[in-house]
Amino acid sequence: MSSLRRSLLALGPLLLAGMSLLAPSFAMGNEEGDTTEPRYPPLNTEVMVPDLPPAPVDPLVRYQGLPSGPAVDTPSQPIAPAIAMGPPEPIAPPPVDHLEVALDWYPSPRHAALYIAKALDMFEHRGLDVRLSTPADPEVPTKLLADSRVDLALTRQPLLHLQVDQGMPLVRVATLVGVPLTALVVRRDTGIESPAQLEGARVGHADQDAERILLPAMLADHDVSMDSIDTPNVHYRMEQAMLEGRVDAIIGGMRHLLPRALANDGLPTRSFAVEQHGMPRHDGLILVANRNELKRQRSAIRRFVSALEEATAWILEHPDESWRRLVVTEPTLDTPLNRDAWPEIRARLTQTPSALSQGRYRDVERFLFEAGLVTERHPVSRLAVDISEP
């Protein structure tokens, strides 16, 4: 007999005894003593249910709703950063380009875009630190630029043609005033009523282009030689030279300022616009750079010209406020003379400084070459660039 069979025979009496003890509790007969049908306890009978141990808590419940993903630990442990975090590194300030700009004259309303751009932080917002300087002599700025002692300079288009012909590494990068601003200003008491009557006169000048380009161009259609005219350099003292009678006329004087200043001092004058007496129309105020440095400085100059464009637009949109801001920024501009001339000069500011009129530069160069005022005819690409182009 197998061991399994012997075990079952041994357990048999025990199983029968257990069933006899449980029978009275769950199998009760009916009133006739029939015990074949199982009966349940009567209603309202108390049933004792033993206390059960609490169900185990799911350890993941506490982590439900919290972030998950590759950068987060698994929910079986408290969430911790995937990398060690420390204090942020200080943000280094963006690089700043420094530009020194030499004015062509002492501060004037025609320089308004420069001063407004500086006052409204338009240079600073473009990562530029700009310094404006006034030259000791009006002939100095382009010479300083050619010698790389300043980064940019203001001048006039005729002087650019002349100095490029002399071998100076200058190139126009922007135009601030796109029309001529100069004139031949003559004392009325001299009796001179036309450039044709300048023979024997003393005509003062402050700039090289006034003496060597503007005056010869005005005399080209008249029987007057340059040798018959005395042309002293009066530097910054144009007004004083006229008032003191040291000269009969000034060539290259600002047509919106010099006649007014002399009239305020009691000296009547006549003015002859240079473009109406032989000189081709040209840019009255331009920004020039050193051609040898242009590649290195191109980005900074482009941002500089962009600031001038924004400043000019602001000036034209806020004519009264721009004047108030201008004289606060540069108090020397706050004179009755400048205030009276401001509307005329403001209307002549160029709205797109970087735009280049190649035809204008080509026409002026051709005129100067044919008149014998320059020795070589230079291409426009040697004279000027559109700095906005890559």
Image (cartoon, helix red, strand yellow):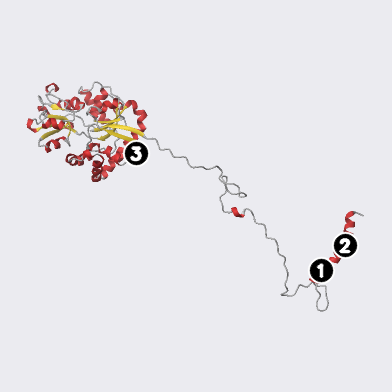
> What residue is drawn where x is 86% and y is 63%?
14
- Give the answer, above or below, for where 180 lies relative to 165: below
Q: Position of residue 272 (x, y in %)?
A: 14, 32
Q: Nearer the viewer, residue 169 or 178?
A: 169
Say which residue label 3 marks.
Answer: 124
- Give the answer, above or below, for where 144 lies relative to 83: above
Say which residue label 2 marks.
Answer: 12
- Label for residue 22? 1
Quarter where residue 303 is shown: top left
Q: Gap between marks 3 and 2, in whole Å? A: 104 Å
Judge from the rendering whether residue 52 lies leftward or rightward of residue 166; answer left or right: right
Q: Tell me whether circle 1 and circle 3 mark residues in contact (CB < 8 Å).
A: no
* Residue type at tag 3: Glu
Q: Gap between marks 1 and 3, in whole Å? A: 100 Å
Judge from the rendering whether residue 47 lies leftward or rightward of residue 187; answer left or right: right
Q: Nearer the viewer, residue 86 or 24?
A: 86
Which of pointers 2 and 1 lies earlier in the amino acid sequence? 2
Q: Position of residue 208 (x, y in %)?
A: 20, 26
